[in-house]
Image (cartoon, rainbow, N blue to C red):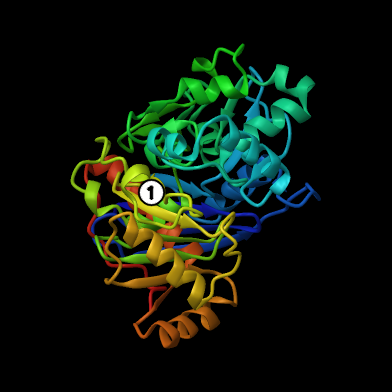
Amino acid sequence: MDLVAGLSFGEHAVTLHVHDLGSGRLHDSKVVALANDSDVPGEVDVGSWATAVIGALDEVSTRTIRSMAISAPLHALVVLNEQRQSLRPVLTAGDQCSAPDAGWCRKKFEADRWSREIGAVPIAAHTVTKLSWLHRSEPDLWERIAHFVAPHDFVSAALAGASVQLCTDVSTASGTGYWSVTERRYHPDVLSLIDSGRDWAPALPLVLDSPELLGAYNGTGVALPTNHLGALGAVLDMAPGDVLITLEGPARVIAVDDADSDSVGRSGPDRAAETSAPPESDPPERLLDSRGVPLLAVPLEHRGLETVTPDTVRRALEILEAAGAQTQGRMIVSSDGSDLSLVAPWLAKSLGRRVLRCGFADATAQGAAQRAAHAITGSWPQWRAPASIR
């Protein structure tokens, strides 16, 4: 039997799924708690993630697993020295220390330029604001940094071998705030805002379009990793009209970018100029899922919509529709918290539509497993939807 594995890690645990390559049937699953040595809110020791991933793999037989892939939070930053050793705890999306830097970035470029050229107007969760915070707050450490990567990129490269080039996927790159969704490259003007004297080319991971194998761990291929949001959009097979509400940080309301869904990477209309959204609202973020499908996302942070309620969801849907997205298809709420069982029926009753529920860790682990399958077959597998959808 040919098997593939997907691992999803967050701030508290690593979830491992082992699936049959052909049918997608779940063969085995494990959950390993994270021993986080950092006591600072919003920070995680990347070594604890690597240890938990290896611990999860040690609990299953990898001899019949042909490939594996990792998914992890979209907005998180690991900084490494020349020897690829971590220099400090991971800055995660939940770390709000860079909120002033988000404001500074927004003052340097107008919102329409951020939206048009990058795909998002900075908020504290975005990685670009973490770069700004590090540059001004830890200048001595800044001079020692050789590489800026996402946690899943770091752990995957460590598993694949010391000589493996640091790589990331287009979905993760689209959420950094310094990679242009339209031009499909790192944006030199944004990086120069942070540090005009740095040679950024060797410091940033190579962005790959396809989920190729990077190397091997104990004979099992290690595929290009992805992020939670990218894995979730792909595993749910989101199509125009579908709406995903993720309660895992930062909370977002997401739809397929229908205007650009048949032309991934091609510059679309200038929505910043054409949108009919109220002027106090930033345009939606433009992101890519793990298949490269373009998404529009409304992060509830920075909009005065800090919690998910029927009113905030209606407001987010208005913003998405003003940007051209369809929103009358499936509505899916994803979380692993106890709030999922409360929020989904509450939204269904208030909005007058069916709302599906989806476990976050299980779905993102399956999404990573499908990414691993794609890496060895050359196409996205048509497996059944995660069992946690109900």
- Element type at mark 1: strand
The N terminus lies in quadrant: bottom left
Residue 184 found in image quarter: top left
Residue 235 visible in the picture? no
Q: Tell me what residue is drawn at x 64 percent, y 19 percent.
A: 83
Identified at 65% across, 31% down, the residue is 132
User: Eyeballing the image, is 4 above or below 358?
Assistant: above
Q: Position of residue 125 (x, y in %)?
A: 59, 47
Task: State how many labels appear.
Answer: 1
Look at label 1 and name its amino acid. Answer: Ile
**Is residue 191 placed above or below 121 in the rendered structure?**
above
Which residue ends up furthest to the front in the rendered image?
279
On screen, 180 above or below 367?
above
Dividing the picture into quadrants, the one containing residue 363 is bottom left
Q: Residue at 61% x, 24% y: name it.
A: 194
Using the rendered image of the protein, determine whether residue 101 is visible from the camera's viewpoint.
Answer: yes
- Please provide percent x and percent y for residue 29: 48, 63
Q: Which residue is mark 1?
A: 65
As drawn, the residue found furthest toward the right would be 39
* Residue 156 sits above or below residue 354 on the image: above
Residue 369 location (% of width, % of height) = 38, 53
